[in-house]
Image (tube, helix red, strand yellow):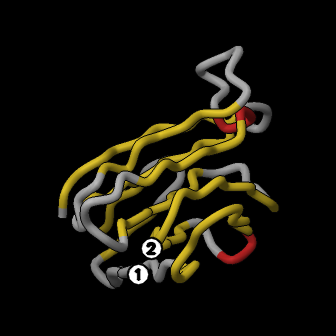
Amino acid sequence: MGIKTDNLEATENTKTVTTEFTPYDLGTISGTTNVDWANGDIQIGLMSADVTFTFSNPKSTTMVLRIAHAASGVAYDITVPSSYNADEAGLSAKVYDLGSGATSRSIFNILHDGTNYHLGRTAFEA
């Protein structure tokens, strides 16, 4: 006996598949840094100075960029291109303050809807 929907049929012989996402490590970053989405949908980096991101090979999916702070006592800025701020028209670039704590983190969720890029940010202390 099984369960059937329009797109899925599951039976008692169905196995669970677990997917693990291994992020692409950008390493220690500063200055102008390119994020090549061909390397993966999830990328991480450790900031040692202000960073201005450029992006290449975007995908029509949700992409995740996780940024950590390399030192305490210095506030670093993250700048992203205006094309990644479709929800904030009129900006030439968007600057985010990462904060000055050694445990400062930011996660950027970037959604490409086929035409526009929508960027959301979550900032926290680890």
Q: Are marks 2 and 1 in contact (CB under 8 Å)?
A: no
Name the mark nearer the viewer: 2 or 1: 2
Taking 64 as reference, is 54 left or right?
Answer: right
**Residue beneath the point at 71% across and 15% down:** 90
Amino acid type of the residue tagged 1 in the rendering: Glu
Q: Which residue is mark 2?
A: 46
In terms of depth relative to the viewer, which is nearer, 121 or 23? 121
Q: Which residue is mark 1?
A: 20
Residue 64 disc label: none
Total residue callouts: 2
**Residue beneath the point at 53% across and 53% down:** 7
Quarter holding the N terminus? bottom left
**Residue beneath the point at 75% across and 72% down:** 38
Taking 5 as reference, is 71 left or right?
Answer: left
Label 2 to label 1: alpha-carbon separation: 22 Å
The image position of residue 64, as x and y in percent, is 51, 58
